[in-house]
Image (cartoon, coloured by chain):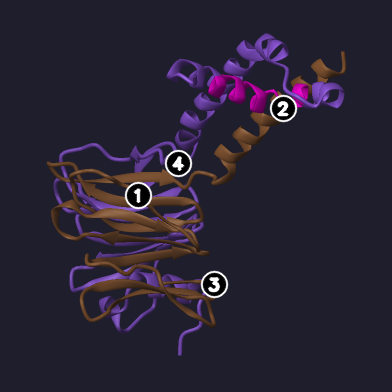
Amino acid sequence: MISGNNIVWQSWDGNDEEIYFWDGSTTTQITDNATYDGDPAISGSNVVWVAGGGSDSEIYLWDGSNTTQITDNAIEDREPAISGNNIVWMGNNGVDYEIYFTTVPEPATGALLGLGFLALLRRNNRNRCGK
Amino acid sequence: MVTAKTRFQDQLKALACWLCYTEITAIGAVNKTCKMKMVSQHFWKAAAKAAAIGLLLAIAPLANAFTITQITDNAIDDWHPKISGNNIVWYANDGNDDEIYWWDGSATTQFTNNATDDKFPAISGSNVAWMRDDGDDFEIYLWDGSARCRLPTTRKSTISVEYQVAKLLGTQTFI
């Protein structure tokens, strides 16, 4: 799968399938574990794939530096696709396959919330000392 | 003698000193020490700050959590989702044959409705391409946002939908 100059694919590392990423000059092995990783999709530097295989596979995201597990359930999740920060996949709800959707949370949301809160505390402190 | 109680009190005071460092610095300019009397005046304010920070630390991970939405909820299999922006396409059996469905970010519409199989959609912007059984074999069809057409190809279903979309839109170079 390709997005701009970035390419992602799955390949056998001698033990199982892993996810690899090429940014136009350098290849990075995104996964390195003892479970199946496959069916990758890419948008920009965001990569999604299926890990685990079988009846309890999960969807994972790599944002260019960190890996995050998107699903965590007891059902099979497979065939992820991504566009920007929007991710879709199909999952078996125990009866049949349904379509699921999520959006990558802005990574700075929590940090900004915290910094704003601490800034508010500092301002209150300064106001009190200035009296 | 340092008891557990006095050690705990000292720890609370130290916490209050740390949380009220602005005030302590102001006091220290005069006395160079953390006056416990002053600290006690600020203790409950410091405790309130500690509680607020604790709450913040508890809430912050939630702000970064994935919110998963189930797009479909029916008694049939929904297959092969693809996405572009907020638009999602997939295919499912409508009771007679496979059809293409489209979710525009808020509502689902049935994109195809005929007596033949439509499968494996791909989407890029407002362009949707997919495979349709024309009675002989599968052909590639395109919706360009206003009209449907069959793509000219001689290799028919041996060419993937994604390949045809990319080639048609000129987003990739194939050799």
Name the spot of residue B58 as percent of width and height, x first: 46, 29
Q: Secondary structure at mark 4?
A: loop
**In the image: residue A119, left or right of residue A101:** right
**Amino acid type assigned to the residue bearing label 1 in the image:** Phe
* The magenta segment: B10-24
Instruction: List x then y, in percent, for residue A29.
Output: 39, 74
Q: Quadrant of residue B83?
A: bottom left
Same chain for the residues at labels 2 and 3, yes or no? no
Q: Is residue B113 visible?
A: no
B64 w.r.t. A91: above or below? above
In this rendering, which labeled residue sits more in front, label 2 or label 1?
A: 2
Name the residue type under label 3: Gly
Relative to residue A117, is residue B147 drawn left or right? left
Q: Residue at x 53, y 28 (%)?
A: B56
**Subunit bearing disc 2:** B
State the separation of the CA atoms marked 3 and 4. Answer: 25 Å
